[in-house]
Amino acid sequence: MTRWQQRLHDAAQQRAAHAAKRTLHTVQRREGARVWVDDRELIDFAGNDYLGLASDPRLIQALRDAAPLGVGASASHLVSGHHAAHAALEQALARWLDAPRALLLGSGYAANLAVLQGLLGRADHCVQDRLNHASLIDGARLAACALHRYPHADAEAAERQLARSTGLAVLASDGVFSMDGDVAPLAALADACARHDALFYVDEAHALGVLGNTGAGSVAAAGLGTAQVPLRLCTFGKALGCYGAALVGDGELIEHLQQSARPYIYTTALPPALAEVAHAAVLLAQGADGERTRLQENFARLRNGAAQLGLSMMPSATPIQPLLVGDNAGTLALADALRMQGFWVGAIRPPTVPQGQARLRITLSATHRPADIDGLLAALAQATREAAHAH
């Protein structure tokens, strides 16, 4: 066995020993909250389609209408790949978030790499919440700056780290934390940045379309704007139901990133047809007050039902509703038991979450019906009873 084969073998053995192997499930068809996997219909409580737009007939029609724009952009934005559909989408995003400019990228992951690599160098500092998305951590490492991680949602600890920073300092935080579902203390973090001349960057991936007036995100919900938060990340693959991402914020910042961010400069632009679909999704999301109300009703129903069953949900006022289990094997067993009863729930294990904090990540959509949630609660009650008896 070669050295690289030995390395792969050892890693696979370690994953198996710790119940850490991830399994790929192939979706054959999706209709709102219903998916077909291996010819079985499941109710999906694992995805991030918060407004139900991923299979919305209006977006499907928008994709059909946009097909003549082209399947591929043919080049990067700065070469010859920047189409009118891209420009219109950027303008629509800037209007929605009341910011001067927007800049499209292929994904939220690429955007976070672009920001931190484009702004920071070896003499600089990046201060981050300990539970930030992996792409923010990777972006700081790519920049080779000093990375400081403060205890989750602790604005005072963040400020202490900013006070010790030299050079340029960027404070980066998720708006809504993807595995916990709680909201960052954005107003306190913004105040800390103002006191220490730091740039505040917020990843709105799980907040856009869900929080704030017209769904403008966690920054808007906190009563903040571009003056306090000069840069925000907006992804299209969650509540907007499609694909891609954009940076939205201060005009000088956006111009600098357009000129310097390698993940923007050195890759082909988003397909024009997908940009047109994302534009349609932006308009739909702004008017989706009814869906946002239904979403709030859905996660309130889940939390109330869980409390009646004695299930201890982690604190969250967003569609991400985690149920802490603890050990990997137990989390997998619960997820498998729920799937057997027709419910698809994510089994989240380290390194995505800290050791000992494996959980079921239950996510709600506006397309979930009350009967779907009640059914999940009944299945959870049965699965947890059976797990307790097995021990």
Image (cartoon, rainbow, N blue to C red):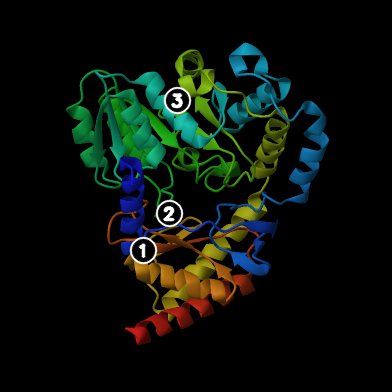
Which residue was labeled with disc 1? 19
Residue at 24% over, 46% down? 151
Q: Position of residue 291 (x, y in %)?
A: 64, 54
Which residue was labeled with disc 2? 181
Camera-side residue of 252 and 343: 343
Which residue was labeled with disc 3? 114
Q: Amino acid at mark 2?
A: Gly
Judge depth for marks 1 and 2 and give the one in front: 1
Mark sitting earlier along the chain (3/1): 1
Q: Say which element carries label 1.
A: loop
Residue 374 falls left or right of residue 65:
left
Badge 1: how crowded within 10 Å, few (<14), some, or many (20+)?
some
Residue at 35% over, 52% down? 9
Residue at 48% over, 39% down? 204
Quadrant of image for the C terminus: bottom left
Q: Is residue 232 visible?
A: no
Q: Position of residue 92 (x, y in %)?
A: 65, 29
Badge 3: how crowded within 10 Å, few (<14), some, or many (20+)?
many
Give the residue furthest to the bottom. 389
